Image: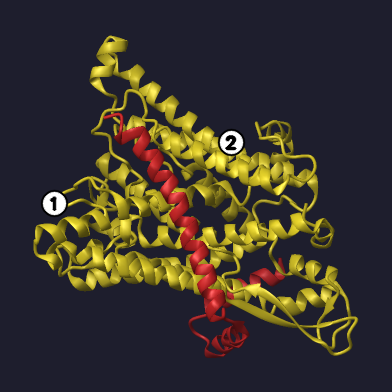
Amino acid sequence: MMDYKETLEEVKSFKIEEELFKKYWRVLKLARTPTRDEFSKIAIVAAAGIMLIGLVGFIIYEIMLVLPK
Amino acid sequence: MGDLLDRFEPILAAMPAVRGPEGHVHFKNKLMWTLAILLLYFSLTNIDIFGLSAQSQDIFGMYRALLAGASGSLLHLGIGPIVTASIVLQLLKGAGLLQIDTSEARGQVMYMGLQKMLIFVMIIVEAFPMVASGMMMPDPTVAAQFFGGNMLTVSLLIFLQVCLGGLLVVLMDEVVTKWGVGSGVGLFIVAGVSQGLVNGFLNWQTGTDPFPIGFFPRLFAIGTSGANFLEYFGTDLLALVTTIVIFMIIVYVESTRIEIPLAHTAVRGARARFPVKLIYASVLPMILVRVLQANIQMIGMFLSNAGITIFGEFQGQTPVNGLMWYIAPINQPQDWMWWLSDLGHAPWEIMLRMGIDITVMVVGGAIFALFWVKTAGLDSKDVARQIQRSGMQIPGYRRSEQVLVKYLDRYIPRITVIGGVFIGLLSVVANLFGVIGAVGGTGLLLAVSITYRLYEEVASQQIMEMYPFMRGFFGKE
């Protein structure tokens, strides 16, 4: 449990100590952001997924509620 | 706490559960199960509770996108009980009050049993006040027709139907988690939000003003009728822009990796990178913080209805003054744009409320993310075991798991905090600007992120299917 308590202290003192900010910044520098085509591929897939599921829901909603009226 | 649990063990183990699959479930079957549950979920949200009068209020109101389900339907509670139960468990386990060692099988059975029992308790704890407080009113005509005017039996009937709906959601969630792809809770949130989104684009029925609610029918109607474009369509354009911007940010952030430097044991000096997602604990911990806020607001509402207004008065479901108003999250543009409509509060008060919301989401997001990582088996020990199995090593260190855990502890907790803070902030900012279909910025953020992770899991399962030997390598069944 020790490592976890120390990190919780870090979260609490996060706003005060400047030095700590550097430690978080060092981790952030290791970030690898997606390339352009990787990004667009994923965006299309996510949008398609949401629209598809949403359409199924919308159609079922129309069938079960609006049309019988 | 420990011995108490041991005595409860027989009951915990006997909790009704969906039988897990023995061998490996073929990928196509997993998709079928998930699709089947999705269709069942959508149809259940359209089956209204028998005997419920139309004036009943949806006390989830603004939080509906988070809690899924549909007001007035069988799934009135949505995933409320499941999420509230996991908040309680996360807090207990995170604070160290719950000593269940989930690494070995017996502990897992106990943990699952406890979670299930807590969910059943939450179903009742959430359903009973709704019916008792008159939020869900019995319909007098139904009472007269079937029960000789006895309203009490109709209320009881409503209560039973709501509990039944809660139970159905629990079982459906378990079917998806064990037999399908991804988690049931995630699927239901995505289902609710995406339905709201598509509804927001296509709905041709007219709402408050003479034009249809849906974005495209409205655009068409306003265009042909020649009414003042900006006046009727201004908020819709803002909503469209916000929707697209939030969508792009989430996709960008979800696919960003932090690469922890490691060296490969076989190849001397080969620089290897162990990629870890920036949003390490996913967006689910953020749901817990939002639902915690929602629960506090609900308690405030019940108190205010019961006449105790020291915490703050409520009109309908929105707090008007007092502590409750200040800690209430901002859910939509109208909540903070004081120049749009008189909110009865000075701008500095609204700023303060926004500041509180941001602080709660940032600090809460980080803490719940840390709890989540510990309970979901994503902490340094688990990652170390994964790295150990893949034969990698830290540059210049002996090849032992202890050293690897110490090394990872310099990265994993910080990545978790950064991810939690960022998602907490984004959730507040997303809510400041309206989104198409009034699903709320947070709802959209959840739907996009969960859909993306669903896609990731589908893709990885496909690879597993094509190369069965890979399954052994990753140790996934």
Identify the residue at image location x=79%, y=46%.
B105
Q: Quadrant of the rendered structure where residue B325 is?
A: bottom left
Identify the residue at image location x=66%, y=57%.
B375
Identify the residue at image location x=21%, y=56%.
B218
State which chain disc 1 sits on. B
Q: Is residue B50 above or below residue B257?
A: above
Q: Position of residue B426 (x, y in %)?
A: 42, 70
Q: Position of residue B429 (x, y in %)?
A: 36, 70
Q: Position of residue A62 (x, y in %)?
A: 34, 39
Q: Which of B373/B195 is in front?
A: B195
Q: Is residue B222 something that shows in the picture? A: yes
Q: Which of B133/B50 is in front?
A: B50
Identify the residue at image location x=9%, y=61%.
B226
Q: Quadrant of the rendered structure where residue B215 is?
A: bottom left
Label 1 sits on what residue type? Asp
Check disc 2 and report the residue beneath it.
B171
Q: Is residue B167 above or below residue B222?
A: above
Q: Any mark on residue B209, and which?
A: 1
Label 2 sits on what residue type? Leu
Which shade of the palette goes to chain B?
yellow
Q: Give the colour scheme of this rendering.
A: by chain
Q: Earlier in the sequence, mark 1 or mark 2?
A: 2
**How many tags in the picture?**
2
